[in-house]
Image: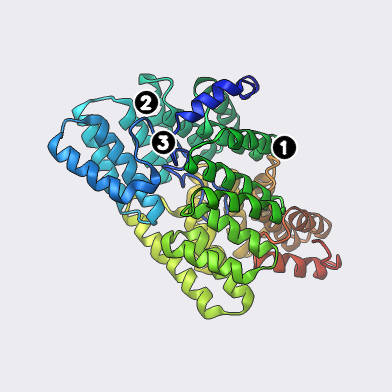
């Protein structure tokens, strides 16, 4: 990044080759619930644009009935099914994706497009070890494959191997500078607490973006970064930019909802989130909407949203998705706490990330095991990642463990970072500070 971001002409040329929505296709590799979205692998030449899926997939199917030996189109179809599952919140499409990718590999064994598609599918199912394995196989065939390079960064991040992820981002930037790589580079920097670098990289990526889908994606990433830092007006401006570029970009609508809630526009936030969950019924937006209703005192509507999370989790498991982290994130506050703790422990046994550390810490806290939770809570905040909910969880755990001074510091950190990080959590943090003698004045 140090060299290639300076090569504006090279970067601009690479970005000009990106397809509309390229940085968005195969999204959702990062945790549902509270975790930040990250860029997703860009499609290769011939990939369907995300906005054209519903009419493009039938066209591809018709083409393949006439040309069943077209391995590249089978790979494209498999990738499109992964994206369709993401955009529709329908994990059942993953089975169709697997069949199409298998067909591609049966026609042309070892082709890198299908191997990279398998990496994306594995990541979407939260099989990050499998995603890394498939990405490495694809890169052995084509070391410059953009999707495989990007999927490799994603897998390493999701496995908690952050130093390796940083090296993988550097390598991807050297080989294929462009929006998918730039956004990953920014996220790896943010995980280290370097929000200035993350913002600089995203600003440069946005300046180079031309396709509406790319503009929408990067502007949304900037909005999410601003929201996590409590800059709600800036977040709303970036997300508005994204929606002007691509009105149907639902992550931008969710981002705008969070920014509106942060600015006190609860009615606007509810409108945006209702539209998101009507078209994108994933756990994160459902929980956000439920908590907005809960903060308003409308528990009937809140419980409806939390119930829909459970419906999605059942569908996800039927589609081959490992939903343990999603279960832990949603159920700890809004469901079966014993199930949440089982799920958090299972996920921690597979991968040690800041998100799994936080989820396990919070599930342990909800089960009254603050002494066990404390080490995990501290691990979640150890990289420097400025996520207010992690500091809130840490503060509440420290309070439960009797470490009052530490609890006050952590809770103030959460509210100083992002005063409206959660409609219910922010309120609970202020109440805890008042109970600890702080006055709850952080804002």
Look at 48% across and 29% down and name the residue there: 16
Q: Quadrant of residue 415?
A: bottom right
Relative image position of residue 380 (x, y in whole percent): 65, 47
Q: Which residue is mark 1?
A: 196
Color encoding of the figure: rainbow
Q: Which of the pair 146/62 is nearer the observer?
A: 62
Q: Tag 2's secondary structure? A: helix
Left or right of residue 190, residue 248 in this image = left
Q: Which residue is mark 3?
A: 131
**CA distance separating discs 1 and 3:** 30 Å
Nearest to viewer (mark 3 / mark 2): 2
Q: Answer yes or no: do the residues labelled 2 and 1 have beta carbons within 8 Å?
A: no
The relative height of residue 420 versus residue 165 in the rendered view (above or below) is below
Report the disc number at residue 138: 2
Q: Tag 3's secondary structure? A: helix
Badge 3 density bin: few <14, some 14–19, many ≥20, Cα 10 Å:
many
Q: Which of the pair 245/130 is nearer the observer?
A: 245
The relative height of residue 308 versus residue 194 in the rendered view (above or below) is below
Look at 63% across and 49% down and name the residue there: 238
Relative image position of residue 419 (x, y in whole percent): 73, 60
Report the disc number at residue 257: none
Look at 56% across and 36% down and name the residue there: 183
Q: Tag 1's secondary structure? A: helix
Left or right of residue 440, residue 170 in this image = left
The relative height of residue 66 versus residue 51 in the rendered view (above or below) is above
- Can you say which quadrant of the picture contains the C terminus? bottom right
Look at 24% across and 41% down and name the residue there: 60
Q: Which of the pair 279/56 is nearer the observer?
A: 56
């Amino acid at each position: 990044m140090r060299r290639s971001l300076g090569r504006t002409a090279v970067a601009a040329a690479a970005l000009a080759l990106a397809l509309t929505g390229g940085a968005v296709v195969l999204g959702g590799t990062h945790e549902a619930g509270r975790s930040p979205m990250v860029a997703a692998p860009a499609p290769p030449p011939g990939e369907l644009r995300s906005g054209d899926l519903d009419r493009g997939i039938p066209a591809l199917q018709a083409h393949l009935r006439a040309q069943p030996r077209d391995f590249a189109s089978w790979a494209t179809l498999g990738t499109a099914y992964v994206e369709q599952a993401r955009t529709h919140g329908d994990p059942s499409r993953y089975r169709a994706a697997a069949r199409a990718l298998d067909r591609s590999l049966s026609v042309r064994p070892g082709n890198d497009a299908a191997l990279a598609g398998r990496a994306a599918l594995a990541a979407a199912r939260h099989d990050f070890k499998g995603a890394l394995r498939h990405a490495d196989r694809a890169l052995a065939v084509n070391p410059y494959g953009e999707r495989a390079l990007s999927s490799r960064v994603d897998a390493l991040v999701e496995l908690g191997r952050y130093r390796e992820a940083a090296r993988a981002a550097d390598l991807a930037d050297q080989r294929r500078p462009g929006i998918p790589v730039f956004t990953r580079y920014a996220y790896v920097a943010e995980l280290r607490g370097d929000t200035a670098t993350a913002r600089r990289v995203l600003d440069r990526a946005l300046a180079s973006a031309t396709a509406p889908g790319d503009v929408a994606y990067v502007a949304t990433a900037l909005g999410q970064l601003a929201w996590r830092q409590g800059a709600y007006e800036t977040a709303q401006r970036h997300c508005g930019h994204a929606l002007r570029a691509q009105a149907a970009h639902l992550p931008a609508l969710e981002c705008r909802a969070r920014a509106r809630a942060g600015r006190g526009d609860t009615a606007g936030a509810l409108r945006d989130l209702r539209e998101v969950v009507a078209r994108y019924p994933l756990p994160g937006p459902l929980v956000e909407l439920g908590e907005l209703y809960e903060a308003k005192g409308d528990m009937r509507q809140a419980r409806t949203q939390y119930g829909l999370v459970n419906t999605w989790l059942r569908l996800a498991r039927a589609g081959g998705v490992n939903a343990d982290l999603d279960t832990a994130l949603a159920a700890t506050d809004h469901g079966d706490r014993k199930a949440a703790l089982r799920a958090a422990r299972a996920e921690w046994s597979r991968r040690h990330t800041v998100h799994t550390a936080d989820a396990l810490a919070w599930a342990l806290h909800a089960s009254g095991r603050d002494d066990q939770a404390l080490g995990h809570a501290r691990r979640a905040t150890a990289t420097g990642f400025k996520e207010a909910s992690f500091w809130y969880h840490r503060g509440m755990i420290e309070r439960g463990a009797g470490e009052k001074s530490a609890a006050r510091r952590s809770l103030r950190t959460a509210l100083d970072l992002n005063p409206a990080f959660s409609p219910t959590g922010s309120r609970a943090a202020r109440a805890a500070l008042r109970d600890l003698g702080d006055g709850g004045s952080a804002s």
